[in-house]
Image (cartoon, coloured by chain):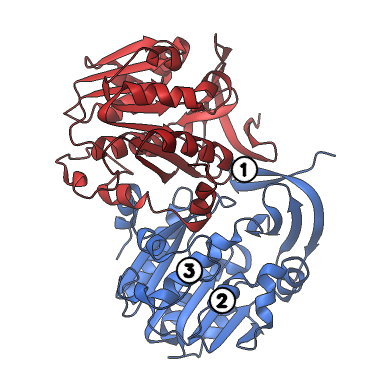
Chain colours: A red, B blue
């Protein structure tokens, strides 16, 4: 049988991967969950039809969503991860020895359980004693928090289904309030080629709250267009301050992140600068 | 009718684009040529089943294959383009006022004729009086040339069909001989995710000839993996020398290239450095 998974990335664009085996296919309380073994990307977690992580390239996404904000902050001790049920963001956060406490708020317990069985390379991090896993809606969790976190990482799915609220101004306001005075928010903000509206909307929201709002980029071959955007909202520190990048940290096992990669990921081509300028600051 | 073009990018990976209209589909003397109008990428030129250029993203590829070597050279006057029948590389080369003569050696006259009809944004450059268009095999053309060009741009298709020879050591040797003493070769060298063997082979060949061999990167969403590699072989100049990037050139109309983008495109993540180290220098 010649089995292919077709991801409908946009109404007019798809990516197809040859499938060795369908390992899981079920509906959780929140979303449709599939786990495939593929030739090109290895194991692949799919939620509501969209690829979330793959064995072959998850390291790029996770290294870049985590080390950029954590290297920007001189001494991050308390970190909140919203989403990230696969454990990949937690794995990278826990590489930083300054971190004393990680709270991970994931809405869907079944994502975590299935990743524990099928993605040990990411999910093993969830066993760390510094990590507390809470099953809740990220927006609800933040409602009465103030001045608690050095870093908030929004490791969400696309803004459909359970993650839709994680791209709204009210959510960003809650995140801002729960950050300490020198805190940093980071969020994944989709493709600069195919989702310019999502990027400009998030940029508008964060620019109203944070004195420092910056977009940075990394290639993720399993994501639409192959180039992904992340957004930093920072209360104090500039994310491309070379001084902070001198922090003593060995970047153990990083295959994408380096301080030079960090710095260069903020260099945006004119076509991205142009559409960011349309954001209503 | 719900019509889709499926590009088989590797045996295990495909990209699908919804098609508005099939404009051309024929066999030339050298290859199968298709021209489609698509929703996501606009018009799209396909040779032997592989996407060559699309209206929406050709500017990234062409700006990066041209301006990086031409900004590295202090005064490029004579430029050879091998391939590039669509005219996009010629368009970018001709933006440099120091350039007095461009020779373009394209094997397939039908590619040029069809681009003149369907891709005026690139093919109009072929009318420029500084450009001489020769229909020939690039390898043959170089055979008796010596010390003629400041820049050689290898704007080839994948190393199958008529372009296979453009990735071989003999071709690179001919290119080296035909470059002046301060000359620079640039070639497109495929995907760092899916074609690591092509990159390491070209890197091995160029490193044996040129004192300066460097890989640089740019995102091209219509190409496999979304991230593309280019390779510079330079007899004298370092391609990320900031001094040369101060050249007075207005980068008119560039939507991807800037001197900062140029510089940062040479910053390679560890996973790429690692496989380049396996190249036999």
Q: Residue at x 50, y 60 (%)?
A: B256
B81 sits to left or right of A93: right
Residues marked 2 and 1, same chain: yes
Which of the two labelled residues, at mark 3 and mark 2, occupies the earlier sequence position?
A: 2
In the rendered structure, the residue with mark 1 lies on which chain?
B
Distance of label 3 from label 2 (alpha carbons): 9 Å
Which of the two labelled residues, at mark 2 and mark 1, occupies the earlier sequence position?
A: 1
Figure check: A150 above or below B254: above
Which of the two labelled residues, at mark 3 and mark 1, occupies the earlier sequence position?
A: 1
Q: Which residue is mark 2?
A: B82
Q: Which residue is mark 3?
A: B187
In the rendered structure, the residue with mark 3 lies on which chain?
B
For this orientation, the residue located farthest to the left is: A248
Residue B32: mark: none
Q: As rendered, which of B97 and A250 lies closer to the eye? A: B97
Q: As rendered, which of A70 and A273 lies closer to the eye? A: A273
B143 sits to left or right of A6: left
Q: Residue at x 38, y 62 (%)?
A: B260
| Mark 2 Cα shell of 10 Å, populated few (<14), some (14-19), many (≥20) | many
Residue B14: mark: 1
The x and y percentages for residue A64 are 35, 39
Q: As rendered, which of A88 and A241 lies closer to the eye? A: A241
Q: Quadrant of residue B213?
A: bottom left
| Mark 1 Cα shell of 10 Å, populated few (<14), some (14-19), many (≥20) | many
A137 sits to left or right of B81: left
Asked if the residue under mark 1 is in contact with the one under mark 3, i.e. CB atoms within 8 Å, the reply is no
Figure check: B256 above or below A151: below
The x and y percentages for residue A150 are 26, 27
């Amino acid at each position: 049988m010649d089995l292919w998974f077709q991801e409908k990335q946009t109404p007019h664009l798809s990516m197809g991967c040859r499938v060795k085996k369908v390992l899981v296919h079920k509906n959780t309380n929140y979303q449709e969950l599939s786990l495939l073994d593929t030739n090109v990307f290895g194991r692949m977690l799919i939620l509501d039809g969209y690829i979330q992580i793959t064995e072959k390239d998850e390291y790029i996404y996770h290294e870049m969503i985590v080390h950029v904000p954590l290297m920007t902050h001189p001494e991050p001790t308390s970190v909140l991860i919203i989403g990230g049920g696969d454990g990949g963001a937690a794995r990278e956060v826990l590489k930083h020895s300054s971190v004393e406490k990680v709270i991970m708020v994931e809405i869907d317990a079944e994502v975590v359980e299935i990743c524990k069985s099928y993605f040990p390379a990411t999910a093993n991090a969830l066993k760390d004693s510094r990590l507390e896993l809470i099953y809740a809606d990220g927006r609800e969790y933040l409602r009465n928090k103030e001045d608690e976190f050095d870093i908030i990482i929004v490791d969400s799915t696309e803004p459909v289904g359970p993650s839709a609220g994680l791209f709204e101004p009210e959510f960003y306001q809650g995140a801002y309030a729960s950050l300490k005075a020198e805190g940093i928010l980071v969020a994944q903000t989709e493709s600069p080629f195919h989702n310019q509206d999502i990027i400009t909307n998030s940029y508008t929201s964060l620019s109203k709250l944070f004195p420092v709002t910056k977009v940075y980029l990394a290639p993720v071959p399993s994501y639409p267009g192959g180039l992904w955007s992340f957004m930093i909202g920072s209360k104090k520190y500039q994310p491309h301050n070379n001084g902070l990048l001198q922090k003593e940290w060995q970047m153990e096992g990083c295959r994408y992140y380096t301080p030079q990669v960090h710095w260069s990921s903020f260099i945006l081509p004119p076509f991205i600068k142009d559409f960011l300028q349309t954001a209503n600051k």
